[in-house]
Amino acid sequence: MKTIVEGRLADIDGVRHGQVVIENGVIAAVGDKLGRADHVFSEDCLIFAGMGDVHIHAREDVTGRDTHKETFATASAAALNGGVVHVADMPNNPAAPIDDASYAAKESTLLSQKLPITFTLYAGIGPGTKPLACLVPYKAYMGPSVGSLYFSTLEELDRTLAAYAGQNVSFHCEDPILLEKHKHAPTHETRRPPECELSATRFALGLIEKYRLAGKLCHYSVGEGLPLIRAAKAKGLAVTAEITPHHVFFDTAMLTDAKRPWMQMNPPLRSPSDRQAMLEALRDGSADFLATDHAPHTISEKEQGVSGQPHLDTYGPFVTWLMVEQGFTPQRIAAISCANPGAFVNPYQPAKFGRLLAGYVGSLTVLDLKRPKRIRREDLKTKCGWSPFEGMTFPGSVAAVFVRGHKTPTQAASAT
């Protein structure tokens, strides 16, 4: 099968009018006048390599215990709704994938479903675990979050990571000792204060250097920690960082008693200055990924104080907010949403994601910057059935998604 898509192409090296030729699911050529286009998009649109989210929680494993929140299938539908074609799923499941057998069991549950989007599965690192026989990315929870896969002390993490030298390890940076110290504070934000993240950041960066890790700092939120990340990069450490939509859109000044349950996540919302610092870190390259930490808890669970927010359905519209209202260039969006996520997952996939280049996967995300999208509950595909952005209107919308050359059905945008 051959498909030609034409319009404004956006990649890390610039924006230009052109065509993408996709044959048998792979980009065969990119250029001008390559043939009669099957799909032509207006100048209001930008055509990106298929966007990727390197931090989601699909919730499904062999136990099925958490599938009331989300499944691989509903996460896939939510991702496509938001313009996302590949995701990396976290390991804090009831049956955590921490060894060859448990990882294979979760992978089998996923692969049996033959879903349109591509999943990369993290393996978990817990006290005393060892690397798997196959090449996978790993996740280490430095302190308690949602689930039971975490360390009680940083020293215990250090001893365990000695076996993972040279591996790709992502860190949830919260110091478990400091979390214990603050556990009786009056609010979620004061129970998990910035010092917990800063302490864990210093320790994680030390471990990345000590064990020659490719280290990723997840859902970063504290402005004071950004100089530490910049210094580590300047030193030559293989360190990257994620920033979430909620940490660049919401902050503690917006909290009210009514909103507090819906605005609870780990790490928590930070100050307005921290929020602005995260926005600038995404813009200037201090941070490398726009990653959602998609945490699909049900409405009743949120009312009971469970941490996390779902963001897959709104990924593309949120990206248009970054471009139209925050001045992000298409090239920068191509880096944090396409090229960098692709570079992260490509070692674990048989085909390459993230660039509009011959030989890469023929999956595309097309955003319309002039067609606003109002976020409505009835348009969401996530099984948990809610979004923190409900009622808000983003300046643009997802115009189309192509998965390996096939145009997928998308939810119509809501103009206001």
Image: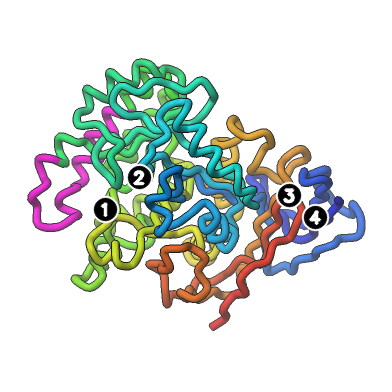
Q: Which mark is first along the chain, 1 or 2? A: 2
Q: Which residues are magenta?
A: 180-204
Give the Cα separation between the discs numbered 3 and 2.
Answer: 32 Å
| Magenta stretch: includes residue 60 | no
Element on which disc 3 rests: loop
- Tell me what residue is drawn at x 74 percent, y 42 percent: 357
Q: Which residue is mark 1?
A: 268
For this rendering, which residue is in front, 400 or 201?
A: 400
Crowdedness of circle 4 by 10 Å Cα count: few (<14), some, many (20+)?
some
> Which amino acid type corresponds to the residue marked 1 in the rendered image?
Pro
- Left or right: 199 as drawn, with respect to 78: left
Q: Residue 220 got which mark?
A: 2
Q: Which mark is first along the chain, 2 or 4? A: 4
- In this orientation, does residue 145 appear? yes
Q: Which mark is first along the chain, 2 or 3? A: 2
Crowdedness of circle 3 by 10 Å Cα count: few (<14), some, many (20+)?
many
Give the Cα separation between the discs numbered 2 and 1.
Answer: 10 Å
